[in-house]
Amino acid sequence: MEAIDTIRALSALAQEHRLAAFRLLVQASEEGMAAGALADSLDVPPSSMSFHLAQLANAGLVTQRRESRSIIYSADYAAMNALMSYLTENCCGGVPCADDASTCPPQATKRTA
């Protein structure tokens, strides 16, 4: 993932309703959710939800498909994983992270003068 793609994805997620919608789509698996169901779940007007979903799609974080009269949105897991990989690429200074991902191994935190 390139820096510009990362910035676009993080910008799209930096809004309360878009972040909540993306989290719901991740939970919904590949099955996805209809735009109307997302709007109802988040208590957001359908027109606003459409705007937010367009922003997530523009950032490459969600895909959409038509089923009958509904548009079904799904999280793009490859894009999500690429974003996570980009953000953690240099985690722990290249030393494998400890099982407890909240900390780096001691040798990774040492600084050289």
Image (cartoon, grey):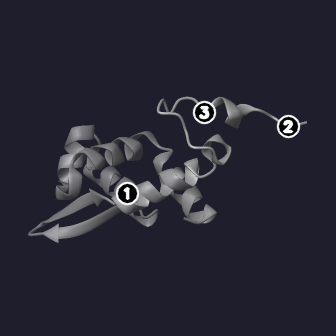
> Observer-nearest residue: 64 or 45?
64
Q: CA distance from mark 2 to mark 3?
A: 16 Å
Question: In the displayed structure, would residue 8 be above or below residue 20?
Answer: below
Where does label 1 land, which residue?
Answer: 51
Task: Say which residue label 2 marks.
Answer: 112
Of the numbered discs 3 and 1, the one sitting upstream in the chain is 1
Specify few, some or many for label 3: CA neighbours under 10 Å numbering under 14, 14-19, or 20 or more: some
Side of 33 where 101 appears, left or right: right
Q: Report whether 61 appears left or right of 37.
A: right
At 66% across and 29% down in the image, what residue appears? Answer: 106
Of the two numbered discs 2 and 3 on the same chain, state the one appearing first in sequence. Answer: 3
Specify the label residue 104 is tagged with: 3
Q: Residue furthest front?
A: 107
> Marks 3/1: CA distance?
39 Å
| Residue 64 x, y percent position in the rendering | 27, 66
Element carrying mark 3:
loop
Q: Amino acid at mark 2?
A: Thr
In the rendered image, the vertical position of residue 54 relative to residue 93, given as above or below:
below
Q: Do the residues bearing badges 3 and 1 touch, measured as CB atoms within 8 Å? A: no
| Mark 1: few/some/many CA within 10 Å (<14, 14-19, 20+) | few
Disc number placed over residue 38 in the picture, else none: none
* Residue found at x 31% / y 65%: 63
- Decide: is 90 above or below 67: above
Quadrant placement of the N terminus:
bottom right
